[in-house]
Amino acid sequence: EEQEEDVLRELRLFLRNVTERLSLDRRFKAFTRPVDIEEVPDYLMVIKKPMDLSTLLTNIDEHKYVTVSEFMLDADLIWQNALEYNPDSDPMDRHIRHRACALKDTVRAILRDELDEDFERVCEEIKESR
Ligand SMILES: Cc1noc(C)c1-c1cc(NS(=O)(=O)c2ccccc2)cc(C(=O)O)c1
């Protein structure tokens, strides 16, 4: 009903705000767009579920997420994919892994500081009721 739509609208505003802040952080530039298959031809042979910050925003706008947990599953794909595709000891791999770990820690810190657990519980109840 209307109250549920109010909650989900607030969820989308919160998730957009978090995602846009991440996209503005220069450390996360490589995570702002899908990995370019022209630049990285074997990427889709290794990574089965690509994800990036612009795709997160599109998913939010398409009402894909009813809870923060669902959003987190996709947000976590971004850094998990980067760790999986860039495992080597060479400086380039290490550099992207450092940024992937910074992305993981930054998302968790934002949600710990800014997400009200009662709000997420209401979202979970809406999800269960559908
Ligand atoms: C992400 C990612 N996962 O595996 C790899 C490898 C990367 C990755 C891919 C690219 N090149 S790209 O053309 O696909 C691109 C440029 C700008 C934004 C988004 C993608 C650059 C870098 C980088 O560190 O600069 C990293």
Image (cartoon, rainbow, N blue to C red):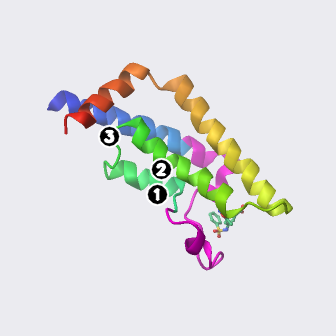
N-terminal label among 1 and 2? 1
**What element does badge 1 sit on?**
helix
Find residue 113 and report its horizontal and vertical position in percent.
Answer: 56, 23
Q: To which quarter of the image does residue 108 belong?
A: top right
Q: Give the mark toward the camera: 3 or 1.
A: 3
Q: Which mark is residue 66?
A: 3
Q: Is residue 5 visible?
A: no
Q: Which mark is residue 55?
A: 1
At label 1, which amino acid type do we have?
Answer: Thr
Distance between the alpha carbons at the discs numbered 3 and 1: 16 Å
Is disc 3 in contact with disc 1, using a CB cutoff of under 8 Å? no
Q: Which residue is mark 2?
A: 74
Q: Amino acid at mark 3?
A: Val
Indicate yes or no whether the magenta region holds residue 41.
Answer: yes
Give the vertical position of 35 relative to 104 (above or below): below
Query: Which numbered marker is on residue 22?
Result: none
Numbered label tally: 3
For ligand 1, which image quadrant applies? Answer: bottom right
- The residues bearing labels 3 and 2 have C-alpha atoms spaced at a distance of 13 Å
Which secondary structure, mark 3?
loop
Crowding around mark 1 (Cα neighbors within 10 Å: few <14, some 14 to 19, many 20+) is some
- Image: magenta residue range: 21-49
Query: What amino acid is at disc 2?
Result: Asp
Q: Residue at x 43, y 43 (%)?
A: 71
The x, y position of residue 55, in whole percent, is 46, 57
Left or right of residue 102: residue 118 = left
Residues marked 3 and 2 touching at CB (< 8 Å): no
Disc 1, disc 2: CB below 8 Å? yes
Q: Is 87 contained in the magenta span?
A: no
Q: How much space separates mark 1 and mark 2, taking CA atoms?
A: 9 Å
